[in-house]
Image (cartoon, rainbow, N blue to C red):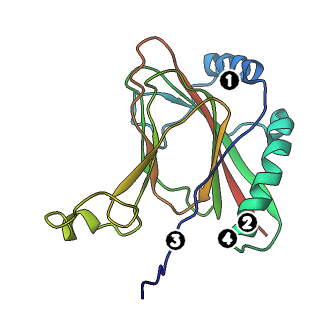
């Protein structure tokens, strides 16, 4: 008898927001704010400093029921509070390196603009040595044997996942259009 002992839940859903105004706001902010380099290598992409949560009330309201559903599904209790929020604007060949979200119990990424060939988000298998251990013997890639799993991104996609789950975003290979996302950390009290 097989027993699935450990599971990682990555929640994906669609929000219903008019992203044009948010993108305009973020592009204006980019002109004034040099941003920071956390998960984007120096000289690639733009990552804002923490955004003012008060400017994104509608986004937070739409996330709330999905966050509660996620917490119920994985049996988490407590009050979820927005910890921090920041934007990513990635042009041609820009990407986000593999990273986690530190002490956040839950992390989220919301995609506002996803042109063709803009790059997928990927999640790494928590069993770090799986590729080495099974390199010569895996028949096919499955959730059990894959070292990472790529997920397509589309406009208005929201991803919710454990803050400790290693993830990254592939390079944007669209030569003319940016990929725009907002990432945020959720703290549970």
User: Residue at the location (50% across, 38% down)?
Assistant: 152
For residue 48, say whether it is visible.
no
Disc 3 to disc 2, how far (Cα)? 14 Å
Q: Which residue is mark 1?
A: 26
User: Residue at the location (78% across, 47% down)?
Assistant: 63
**Residue 184 or 51: which is nearer the viewer?**
184
Disc 3 to disc 4, how far (Cα)? 10 Å
Disc 3 to disc 1, how far (Cα)? 35 Å
| 88 relative position to 131: left or right | right
Q: Which residue is mark 2?
A: 71
Q: Residues within 10 Å of mark 4 (few under 14, many from 20)?
A: few
In the picture, which quadrant includes the C terminus?
A: bottom right
Disc 2 to disc 4, how far (Cα)? 5 Å
Of circles 3 and 1, the one toward us is 3
Disc 2 to disc 1, how far (Cα)? 29 Å
Q: Which residue is mark 4?
A: 74
User: Residue at the location (36% across, 60% down)?
Assistant: 142
Relative to residue 128, is residue 55 depicted above or below? above
Q: Which residue is mark 3?
A: 7
> Disc 2, disc 1: CB below 8 Å?
no
Residue 99, horizontal then vertical, whole percent:
45, 52
| 188 relative position to 5: left or right | right
> Disc 2, disc 4: CB below 8 Å?
yes
Q: What is the number of the mark on residue 166?
A: none
Q: Along the polypeptide, which appears first: circle 2 or circle 1?
A: 1
């Amino acid at each position: 008898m097989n027993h699935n002992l450990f599971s990682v839940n990555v929640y994906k859903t669609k929000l219903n927001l008019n992203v044009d105004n948010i993108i305009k706001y973020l592009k204006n902010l980019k002109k004034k704010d040099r941003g920071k380099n956390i998960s984007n290598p120096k000289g690639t992409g733009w990552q804002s400093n923490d955004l003012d949560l008060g400017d994104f009330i509608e986004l937070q309201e739409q996330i709330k029921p999905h966050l509660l559903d996620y917490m119920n599904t994985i049996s988490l209790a407590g009050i979820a509070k927005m910890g921090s929020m920041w934007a990513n604007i990635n042009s041609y060949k820009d990407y986000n390196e593999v990273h986690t979200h530190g002490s956040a119990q839950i992390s989220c990424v919301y995609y506002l603009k996803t042109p063709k060939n803009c790059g997928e988000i990927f999640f790494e298998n928590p069993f770090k040595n799986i590729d080495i251990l099974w390199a010569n013997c895996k028949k096919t890639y499955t959730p059990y044997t894959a070292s990472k799993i790529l997920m397509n991104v589309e406009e208005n996609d929201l991803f919710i996942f454990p803050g400790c789950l290693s993830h990254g975003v592939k390079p944007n290979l669209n030569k003319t259009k940016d990929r725009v996302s907002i990432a945020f950390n959720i703290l549970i009290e």
